[in-house]
Image (spheres, grey):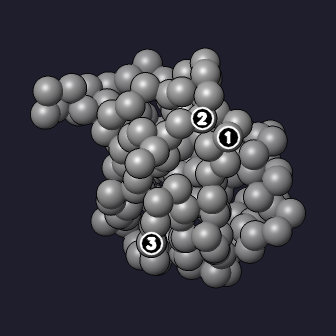
Amino acid sequence: MIAISTVIWALTILVYHHAQGDPSYEIQITEIKSISDNKEYVDPVELSAGTSTISIKSTVKKEVPQDAICETLFYKNVDGNFKKSPIGIAAAPCCEVMFENELFKRIMENQNVPKACPFTPGTYSVENYALDTSKHKNPPRGEYRANFTASLPSEGIIYGVLLTFSIVDKA
């Protein structure tokens, strides 16, 4: 589902853009929550996270139109305040963002996620998705937020997820 893939992309994009050295870090997910009050399209999401793993389950109640726009903004905690990062997923049709992405294509192979657009009603999930930190070397340490939204031109935000996580040295 749109939220599932974007939360995973949020972590992947952040660490991918800073690949430089040996993997000596782990990702600690500290908060993951739904941030949209609109319940017409997607029921509240069941979210859980562990160190470098995410499980997400949501129910699409109403077909999500193909003109839905997805966007992810990233923020880094600097001196106690989250400052917007230049890294992100630019606003674009959700179907393009998802189905043209190699990561999501791999997720589709073994997870219960939509396989085509428009997103039809049903319950979708990703169980214990683990980010492979060995592929992304030496990202900057710190606390980050990823704010994902899906919106419709006529209705505004129809779904949103806020993910807070830290990239820390391995113990």
Q: Residue furthest right?
A: 109
Q: Is residue 72 above or below residue 40?
A: above
Asked if the residue at tag 2 contacts the one at tag 1, i.e. Cβ–Cβ closer than 8 Å, the answer is: yes
**Mark earlier in primary sequence (3, 2):** 2
Residue 73 spot, x, y in % from top left: 42, 34
Residue 53 spot, x, y in % from top left: 55, 62
Which amino acid is tagged 1?
Ser
Residue at 25 percent across and 32 percent down: it is 77
Which amino acid is tagged 3?
Ser
Which amino acid is tagged 2?
Pro
Which quarter of the picture shows residue 60? bottom right
Q: How far is mark 1 from mark 2, CA to CA?
A: 5 Å
Q: How far is mark 3 from mark 2, CA to CA?
A: 24 Å
**Mark earlier in primary sequence (1, 2):** 2
Residue at 62 percent across and 43 percent down: it is 133
The foreground one among 1 and 48 is: 48
User: What residue did someone put label 2 on?
Assistant: 23
**Mark earlier in primary sequence (1, 3):** 3
Residue at 67 percent across and 80 percent down: it is 122
Which quarter of the picture shows residue 4? bottom right
Q: How far is mark 1 from mark 3, CA to CA?
A: 23 Å
Q: Residue furthest left?
A: 80
User: What residue did someone put label 3 on?
Assistant: 48
Circle 2 Cα neighbour tier, 10 Å, few/some/many (<14 / 14–19 / ≥20): some
The foreground one among 24 and 109 is: 24
Secondary element at image label 1: helix
Left or right of 162 on screen, residue 7: right
The foreground one among 171 and 51 is: 171
- Looking at the rendered image, the quarter that the N terminus falls into is bottom right
Residue 83 spot, x, y in % from top left: 26, 26
